[in-house]
Image (cartoon, coloured by chain):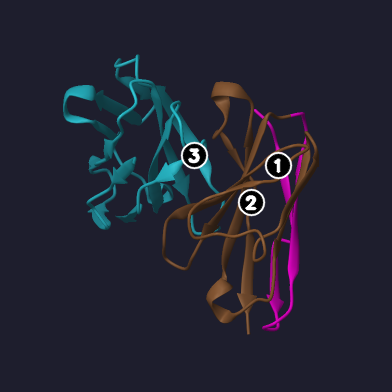
Amino acid sequence: AQKVTQAQTEISVVEKEDVTLDCVYETRDTTYYLFWYKQPPSGELVFLIRRNSFDEQNEISGRYSWNFQKSTSSFNFTITASQVVDSAVYFCALRSSGGGADGLTFGKGTHLIIQP
Amino acid sequence: SAVISQKPSRDICQRGTSLTIQCQVDSQVTMMFWYRQQPGQSLTLIATANQGSEATYESGFVIDKFPISRPNLTFSTLTVSNMSPEDSSIYLCSAGTGQLYGYTFGSGTRLTVV
């Protein structure tokens, strides 16, 4: 069975601080895909990134960066110089290419609050 | 990536009734999925909507309660049957092609059962 753990239920920081959201995953498959989504108060899910299990390169996109470490089964997400507009619930998700469900397994989400 | 139109965006329904949610994709996609997000919770996969065959349901979800149709590669419906207040949730459609699936979600249907 696969599992995604986001241990941080809620994080509150002051604007301009850096913040890291943790994601730990479990899967027995050697090929899998990891995702991060943002869900603002309006409710829609906004895709942020996809990473496959063979690509351990870290990625940076503007103020966002992701650290993928297979050795610790983690795929952490860092926001640099946070802004109020970053306030949302962030979900980490996993899809394995092996047998079983093809859909995504989501973590419980981290509610990020950026205070002005 | 595909663009998904989902409707209705929200509804308030009486218990015991049924609601059908529509998901329209602007391009042909291999895979379509339905998720449920209960209040304050994460997303849970309900089923994979298979084109031309019966949907594949996850543990805890059954066809009688959540019948799904997928008549072609761009459209699917989810029906929530015999609703109770416990069915109050956001229902989301997701679609994609090949390894790229999971990119796109519909805007969701916010269902309240009274």
Among the chains pictured, the one given cyan colouring is: A
Determine whether, in the image, residue A45 is placed left or right of residue B9.
Answer: left
The total number of labels drawn is 3
Q: Secondary structure at mark 1?
A: strand
Query: What residue is drawn where x is 60% and y is 58%?
Result: B91
Q: Work out whether disc 1 and disc 3 sit on a shared chain.
A: no
Q: Amino acid at mark 1?
A: Ile
Query: What residue is drawn where x is 63% and y is 69%?
Result: B111
Q: Relative to the observer, which residue lies in front, B84 or A56?
A: B84
Spot occupied by residue A68 in the image (x, y as percentages of width and height): 27, 25
Q: Sequence order check: which comes first, mark 1 or mark 2?
A: 1
Asked if marks 1 and 2 touch (Cβ < 8 Å), the reply is: yes
| Label 3: chain letter | A
Q: Which residue is mark 3?
A: A101
Image: magenta residue range: B1-28
Asked if marks 3 and 2 touch (Cβ < 8 Å), the reply is: no
Among the chains pictured, the one given brown colouring is: B
Q: Which residue is mark 1?
A: B4
In which image quadrant can residue B63 be found? bottom right
Spot occupied by residue B100 in the image (x, y as percentages of width and height): 56, 25
Q: Which residue is mark 2?
A: B107
| Residue A32 belongs to the span the image colors magenta | no
Inter-mark Cα distance, 3 to 2: 23 Å
Q: Nearer the viewer, mark 3 or mark 2?
A: 3
Q: Relative to the observer, which residue lies in front, A49 or B16?
A: B16
